[in-house]
């Protein structure tokens, strides 16, 4: 065998080894076997510490594991090797977004757009970064620039509507959001026509759920608006809400969504109703409470409360972990119970747990100096149905403090005093910079001043309680 052929075979052999190893690594990543993948990658780094592909893969894996410091360390080393690799720049930017380092993410997206001015996805991400950083006016300007260049840009159309709504600009926000509803076949054209022509009397309107349980609780209020205009209101809802919604007096026909869809004259999803009505804040709270829990159910929970003069606070500290997994870490809604439970040390306060499922295990890790009363998990929200016992219990509490989950919406729907604890990055329904919300007149908002800063939120709640409520 001649020398050139030997060299060719050696190179071919080595390329095959590299390709096979990366194929194996990619398979491990796909199957979320991250530690095994990292072991292979670290072996490669020992023989070649300047391998761009290895550093990139390490950054990708560490980001997936939410080990962001390690992800950035490898990403920055990879950038030294290939400064203008756009995939790496995107990885770095998304990592910075995850940890709330918005200026760094913004700088990268601007750099990418300068380098690739025809790639509107980079310009859109400039707007997205500004939006989650709370710079709504600047974000709106960028979204409009994207739409000037590409009017049918799906993400920018949707984001612009939500940004306008979060800014409190409902006059422009609902028409913009309706563009998305039309494309998503959720515009409720027949219902809009009946509303505009005042022909709802005697018509059957079908409402179906969209989003989570809290979304359904928030927007079922529109059953009243339809009912008072003469419609017959039919609702198909998530199973856990059927019993609670049976106590909404504005629903004529109620069942779980899997049941047969009845005959109807028009239909709409619950979350599309504000846009269909083109509502303004003066109408959001037209009728609260809009659940009428029977007094006998409320009275049945009275013995579970201390018969004293303490200020009774129900707390809910964790939203659905599965739901939050898809959110940026700086947008996740759960607050550590060890932090929130310090409210129990305030004078004349008794805490009651309203937590169900995710987060309940945190009660076992509290120090003995902290006391939080619990309801029997075998009967709570089972005795009378999901959310019904929670609603009954709320009538015995002086205050509910909750993260952004169904419990907070339920308290607002019942017109019970509620403090809503929000992360730095929130969705459109909580108007930016506002301490109150037109959706729920009984709600006060406490929001993180910076990403992940729950300590300031809890301290603000404590200060407000002690100066305004407990010790006037």
Image (tube, rainbow, N blue to C red):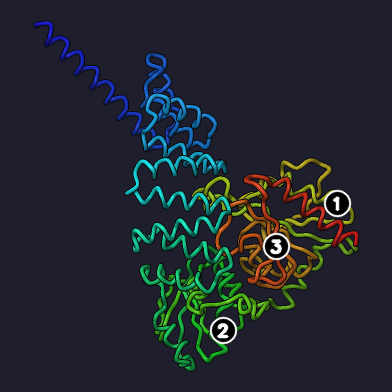
Q: Is residue 53 above or below residue 173?
A: above
Q: Is residue 52 left or right of residue 284?
A: left
Q: Nearer the viewer, residue 444 or 357?
A: 444
Q: Secondary structure at mark 3?
A: loop
Label 2: which residue?
Answer: 225
- Which dot marks residue 329? none
Residue 43 visible: yes
Percent x, y of residue 67: 53, 33
- Outermost residue, left direction? 1
Percent x, y of residue 220: 56, 75
Residue occupying image coordinates x 47% and y 53%? 127
Q: Is residue 155 above or below residue 257?
A: above
Label 3: which residue?
Answer: 435
Residue occupying image coordinates x 68% and y 62%? 380
Q: Quadrant of residue 183?
A: bottom left
Q: Is residue 33 above or below residue 137?
A: above
Percent x, y of residue 437: 66, 67
C-alpha gap between disc 1 and disc 2: 42 Å
Q: Secondary structure at mark 2?
A: helix
Label 1: which residue?
Answer: 346
Q: Secondary structure at mark 1?
A: loop
């Amino acid at each position: 065998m001649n020398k050139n052929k030997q060299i060719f075979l050696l190179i071919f052999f080595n390329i095959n080894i590299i390709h096979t190893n990366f194929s194996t690594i990619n398979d491990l990543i796909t199957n979320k076997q991250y530690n095994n993948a990292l072991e292979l990658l670290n072996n490669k780094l020992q023989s070649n510490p300047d391998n761009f592909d290895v550093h990139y893969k390490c950054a990708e894996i560490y980001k997936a594991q939410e080990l962001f410091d390690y992800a950035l360390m490898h990403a920055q080393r990879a950038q030294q090797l290939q400064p203008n690799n756009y995939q790496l720049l995107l990885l770095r930017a998304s990592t910075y977004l995850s940890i709330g380092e918005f200026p760094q993410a913004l700088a990268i997206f601007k750099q990418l757009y300068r380098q690739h001015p025809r790639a509107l996805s980079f310009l859109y991400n400039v707007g997205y970064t500004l939006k989650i950083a709370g710079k709504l006016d600047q974000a709106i300007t960028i979204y409009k620039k994207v739409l000037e260049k590409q009017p049918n840009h799906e993400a920018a159309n949707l984001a612009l509507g939500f940004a306008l709504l979060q800014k409190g600009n409902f006059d422009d926000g609902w028409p913009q959001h309706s563009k998305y509803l039309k494309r998503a076949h959720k515009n409720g054209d027949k219902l809009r026509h009946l509303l505009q022509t005042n022909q709802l009397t005697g018509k059957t309107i079908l409402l179906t759920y969209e989003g989570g349980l809290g979304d359904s609780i928030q927007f079922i209020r529109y059953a009243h608006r339809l009912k008072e205009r003469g419609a017959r209101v039919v609702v198909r809802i998530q199973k856990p809400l059927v019993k609670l919604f049976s106590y909404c007096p504005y629903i004529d026909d109620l069942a779980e969504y899997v049941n047969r869809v009845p005959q109807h004259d028009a239909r709409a999803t619950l979350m599309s109703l504000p846009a269909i009505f083109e509502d303004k804040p003066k109408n959001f709270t037209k009728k609260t409470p809009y659940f009428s829990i029977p007094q006998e159910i409320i009275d049945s929970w009275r013995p579970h409360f201390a018969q004293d003069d303490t200020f009774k606070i129900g707390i809910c500290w964790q939203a659905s972990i599965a739901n939050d997994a898809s959110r940026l870490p700086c947008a996740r809604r759960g607050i550590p119970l060890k932090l929130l439970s310090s409210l129990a040390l305030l004078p004349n306060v008794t805490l009651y747990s309203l937590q169900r499922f995710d987060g309940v295990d945190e009660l076992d890790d509290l120090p003995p100096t902290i006391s939080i009363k619990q309801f029997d998990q075998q009967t709570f929200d089972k005795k009378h149905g999901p959310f019904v016992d929670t609603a009954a219990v709320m009538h015995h509490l002086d205050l509910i403090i909750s993260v952004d989950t169904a419990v907070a919406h339920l308290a607002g729907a019942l017109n019970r005093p509620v403090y809503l604890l929000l992360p730095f990055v929130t969705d459109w329904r909580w108007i930016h910079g506002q301490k109150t919300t037109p959706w729920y007149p009984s709600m006060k908002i406490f929001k993180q001043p910076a990403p992940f800063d729950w300590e300031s939120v809890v301290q603000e709640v404590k200060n407000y309680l002690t100066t305004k409520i407990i010790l006037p």
